[in-house]
């Protein structure tokens, strides 16, 4: 139980705060929005609980932590420059003196003060070329990860990390070289909002889908700025940049996992080319490190130039003589399988990939036009033939929804194809059954369409009028719910404020309740009808109905005193 003077001081402080400040405090202290607090005294009691304080200390920056430890060891207030931050987190009183419960935990954690930080690494020449290569390579790899996630969500295990099967999928697809790289890139994507979680899987967000269409430098710049903005505040400067990365392991003295957290963020920044192997800041990220805008001109000179043309060959392959512009790469990969990723990438066309492109909304004409404009060698006859043949066959199976029966209907003019679909075991999940010259299913039309497509049937989805309609298969992450602390904690703040309208009376009743529970002996100051006061020394025995009951130690009688006449109490030592 925190000391009553501290509890009341914090309750008064909480009552004086704006709702926005209370909401931010509750968020910082990881308070449950469903907490059953009745007033500010309940809130103060909970915030001064040792377990709550222990959770509040790890996020403190080194400057805040050193100031708090020094103040505790000397018994003096914390300096003015950090006082507001520590008051806001309910760790010190408004006058800067640490609450007793906080001082006890801080003193136990650092009885001899916080050890000096490890000295920074000696300056070395910045490895700009390697950092630039890392920026380019990982921007391309992250795009591959997002494209694969659009095809199929990335599964998560209970801890929230990628499952082993998903790591293997990314490695086997050539998006990453190692499972550790998969974890790193997914972590970067999640931290900057390109991936969103459903709890059991990672999905590409709408922002991530838009990011895929950006030029490489824009991809890098947008992600770099967001990485800087989501960096833990212990690593940030007052100007909005970041402190030297060599200092990050010592930036969170109260956090037992501080070194591990620092290593994770240094790895992310290194992968994105924001710091180099010597923990130095390359020229292109110096603006971000200083809290300014990013300047990519220095990075542009070190990146390989992107190309906007490819060589289309008779063996149904395409060779890009350099890194293909992202918007062209994304579209080309919707109609061809990329076989290799390097400075010169190769892609392979097939009837299946062309069919998938047509399923996604392309037509024979749009495919010819795009590939003709993209090619340095014209449109080879074998590729043109595959496009024409696949386009002619595509759509022989039509999938629609009957507005009257609400059943999905699958029709085709080819009886052999109809019979094949009827007995195809790979379509058991959609339960197709014969209905005259068609197949019907109780499963939704979109699900039936994708099942047929996966089984390599030339299916097309049509609307009620019979016109083809394009279906978007990729399932995107839902918009992130509101994270406004005031909205989250509004009900709790309302309850706390409603219970503290008469703070003096509430505090008196709380002190009397504690005295009764402890059967404590207290001096009770009572206001008499003539305006005078009298002190009764009572052993508190009961509280209820607006009255205090207790045994008068001096007269050895039971007394009942109305709470409305009690001006104050004091414990008897």
Image (cartoon, rainbow, N blue to C red):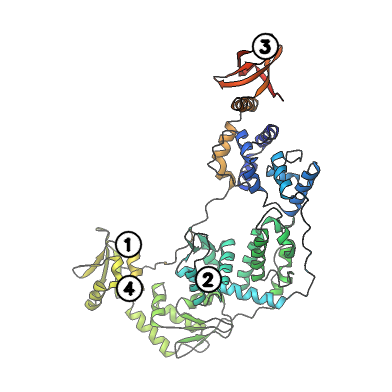
The residue identified by callout 3 is 528
Q: Earlier in the sequence, mark 3 or mark 1?
A: 1
**In the rendering, at what x and y percent does residue 570 appear?**
70, 23
Asked whether residue 172 is in view, the answer is yes
The residue identified by callout 2 is 145
The residue identified by callout 4 is 459
The residue identified by callout 1 is 444
**In the rendering, at what x and y percent does residue 483 appear?**
56, 50
Q: Is residue 141 above or below residue 518?
A: below
Mark 1 neighbour class, 10 Å CA radius: few under 14, some 14 to 19, many 20 or more = some
Q: CA distance from mark 3 to mark 1?
A: 80 Å
Instruction: Classify residue 429 as left or right of residue 340.
Output: left
Identify the element where label 3 is drawn. loop
Disc number placed over residue 291 in the picture, else none: none
Identify the element where label 4 is drawn. strand
Point out the image quarter for the C terminus: top right
Q: Identify the residue at image location x=69%, y=55%.
A: 233
Q: Is residue 88 above or below residue 257?
A: above
Residue 15 vs residue 239, the one in the foreground: 15
Instruction: Classify residue 569 as left or right of residue 393.
Output: right
Q: Identify the residue at image location x=77%, y=62%.
A: 118
Q: Earlier in the sequence, mark 2 or mark 1?
A: 2
Instruction: Single out the mark in the foreground, 3 or 1.
Output: 3
Q: CA distance from mark 4 to mark 2?
A: 28 Å
**In the rendering, at what x and y percent does residue 142 appear?**
56, 71
Q: Earlier in the sequence, mark 1 or mark 4?
A: 1
Residue 524 vs residue 434, the one in the foreground: 524
């Amino acid at each position: 139980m925190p000391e009553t003077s501290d509890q009341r001081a914090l309750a008064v402080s909480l009552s004086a705060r704006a709702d926005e400040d209370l909401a931010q405090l509750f968020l910082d202290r990881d308070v449950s929005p469903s907490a059953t607090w009745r007033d500010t005294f309940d809130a103060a009691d909970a915030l001064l609980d040792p377990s709550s304080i222990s959770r509040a200390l790890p996020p403190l920056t080194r400057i805040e932590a050193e100031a708090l430890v020094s103040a505790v060891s000397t018994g003096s207030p914390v300096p003015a420059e950090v006082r507001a931050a520590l008051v806001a987190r309910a760790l010190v009183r408004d006058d800067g003196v640490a609450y007793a419960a906080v001082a006890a935990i801080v003193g136990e954690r650092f009885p001899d003060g916080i050890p000096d930080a490890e000295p920074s690494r000696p300056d070395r020449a910045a490895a700009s070329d390697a950092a630039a290569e890392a920026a380019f390579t990982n921007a391309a790899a992250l795009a591959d990860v997002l494209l694969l996630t659009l095809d199929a969500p990335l599964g998560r295990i209970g801890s929230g990390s990628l499952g082993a099967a998903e790591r293997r999928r990314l490695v086997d697809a050539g998006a990453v070289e190692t499972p550790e790289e998969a974890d790193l890139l997914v972590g970067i994507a999640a931290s900057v909002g390109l991936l969103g979680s459903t709890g059991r899987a990672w999905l590409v967000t709408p922002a991530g889908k838009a990011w895929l269409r950006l030029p490489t430098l824009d991809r890098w710049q947008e992600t770099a700025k967001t990485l800087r903005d989501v960096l833990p505040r212990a690593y940030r400067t007052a100007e909005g940049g970041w402190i030297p990365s060599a200092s990050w392991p010592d930036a969170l003295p109260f956090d037992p996992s501080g070194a591990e957290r620092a290593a994770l963020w240094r790895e992310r920044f290194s992968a994105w080319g924001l710091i180099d192997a010597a923990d130095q800041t390359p020229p292109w990220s110096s603006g971000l490190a200083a809290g300014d805008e990013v300047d990519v001109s220095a990075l542009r000179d070190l990146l390989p130039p992107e190309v906007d043309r490819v060589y289309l060959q008779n063996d149904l392959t395409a060779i890009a003589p350099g890194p293909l512009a992202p918007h062209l790469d994304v579209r080309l990969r919707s109609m061809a399988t990329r076989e290799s990723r390097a400075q010169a990438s190769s892609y392979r066309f097939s009837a299946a990939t062309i069919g998938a492109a047509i399923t996604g909304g392309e037509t024979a004409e749009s495919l010819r036009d795009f590939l003709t404009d993209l090619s340095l060698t014209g449109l080879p006859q074998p590729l043109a033939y595959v496009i024409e043949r696949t386009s002619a066959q595509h759509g022989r199976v039509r999938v629609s929804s009957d507005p009257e029966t609400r059943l999905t209907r699958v029709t085709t003019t080819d009886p052999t194809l109809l019979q094949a679909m009827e007995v195809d075991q790979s379509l058991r999940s959609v339960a197709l059954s014969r209905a005259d010259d068609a197949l019907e299913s109780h499963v939704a039309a979109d699900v039936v369409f994708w099942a047929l497509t996966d089984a390599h049937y030339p299916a097309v989805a049509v609307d009620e009028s019979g016109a083809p309609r394009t279906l978007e298969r990729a399932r995107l992450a839902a918009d992130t719910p509101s994270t406004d602390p005031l909205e989250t904690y509004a009900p709790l703040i309302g309850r706390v404020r409603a219970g503290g309208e008469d703070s003096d009376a509430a505090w008196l009743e709380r002190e009397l309740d504690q005295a009764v529970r402890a059967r404590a002996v207290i001096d009770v100051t009572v206001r008499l009808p003539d305006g005078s006061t009298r002190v009764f020394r009572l052993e508190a025995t009961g509280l209820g109905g607006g009255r205090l009951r207790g045994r008068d130690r001096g007269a050895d009688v039971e007394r009942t005193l109305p709470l409305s006449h009690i001006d104050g109490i004091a414990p008897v030592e």
